[in-house]
Image (tube, rainbow, N blue to C red):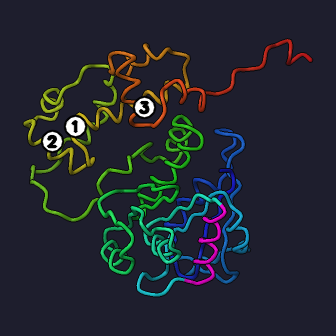
Amino acid sequence: MTSVALAVTEGIPLIEVAAPCEVFGVDRSDLADPWYDFAVCGPDDARVGGWFKVDGPAGLDVLVAADTVIVPACRNVHESQPADLVDAVRAAHERGARVVSICSGAFVLAAAGLLDGRRATAHWLHADLLAQRYPRVRVDPEVLYLEDDGIFTSAGKAAGMDLCLHIVRLDHGAAVANALARRLVVAPHRTGGQAQFIPTPLPSVGGNHGLAELLPWAIARLEQPLTVGDLARRANMSSRTLARHFNAVTGAAPLQWLLTQRIHRAQELLETTNDSVEEIAARTGMGTATTLRRHFSRSVGVPPDTYRRTFAPEPPAPADLLAD
């Protein structure tokens, strides 16, 4: 998936365009070589955000030929989407492209028929309209991003960055995605299942809910057998109160969140070290290699050894070959 085409149309918001441009459009060949071959596609006179003029965009034929197509937004969810863009997105999908939408870009994918019978998400403000206009789409308004059979959709602006980093993680592994996140000074990984921050009444805790300090504290101690009681004591909360706040902030129960962080740590160690699966199980708090293999396979979709073969850097060539 080396070529990425970003679809721009007149009047779409600038911030949805910024995330894919920053992630895929900047040369990061020091992180992974080759990086992405990036193109912005759209009409010559397109102005993003109402004032930013796209300089020399490529045509939609480039979008149709790309490995990955990103539709960052649409100008107006209440209007019909541009027919030429809808046709191009459909054609790209038919030839096997990975298709991605950010926020209201899901309306373009839905108009192209790509979301029929599939789960999809969008910003919670637009989710009801998306479901009403396209009843064959199974709209899930409560997640940050999701994938269904090669079609990726995401919620609002920040979730678009999360999804772009997730795609880098799929293509190049956790270590590369985390290194890029550090450069961008953003969270290295928010799981797609994390809840959108929809305005709903939350329990009042008189200021800081405590998770801002608790989460990095727990991540620094993943090798330890942490329990809900340990977390609750650290946060100075009851176990029940802690569970409520975890669900509100992360979209998961405390132990499920811990398991997810341990899987992420295992991915990094598999990519960046020669530690055995048994050693990684101990360093991530999984206990045994059997436990790690079970949870890793269930979460990532492949066993740890297969993941390592896919994403670990190639060993250096022997010295005698280099001499030749």
Label drawn at residue 297: 3
Q: Which residue is mark 2?
A: 243
Q: Is residue 114 left or right of residue 44?
A: left
Q: Does the residue at mark 1 contact the one at mark 2 (Cβ under 8 Å)? A: yes
Residue at 68% from the left image edge and 68% from the top image edge? 64
Q: Quadrant of residue 63?
A: bottom right
SS at badge 1: helix
Q: Mostly what secondary structure, the magenta segment?
A: helix
Hey, what amino acid is under mark 1? Pro
SS at badge 2: helix
| Above/below status of 253 relative to 323 | below
Single out the mark in the foreground, 2 or 3. Answer: 3
Find residue 309 and report its horizontal and vertical position in percent: 60, 27
Q: CA distance from mark 2 to mark 3?
A: 26 Å
Hey, what amino acid is under mark 2? Ala
Q: Earlier in the sequence, mark 1 or mark 2?
A: 2
Find residue 109 and report its horizontal and vertical position in percent: 50, 71
Q: Earlier in the sequence, mark 2 or mark 3?
A: 2
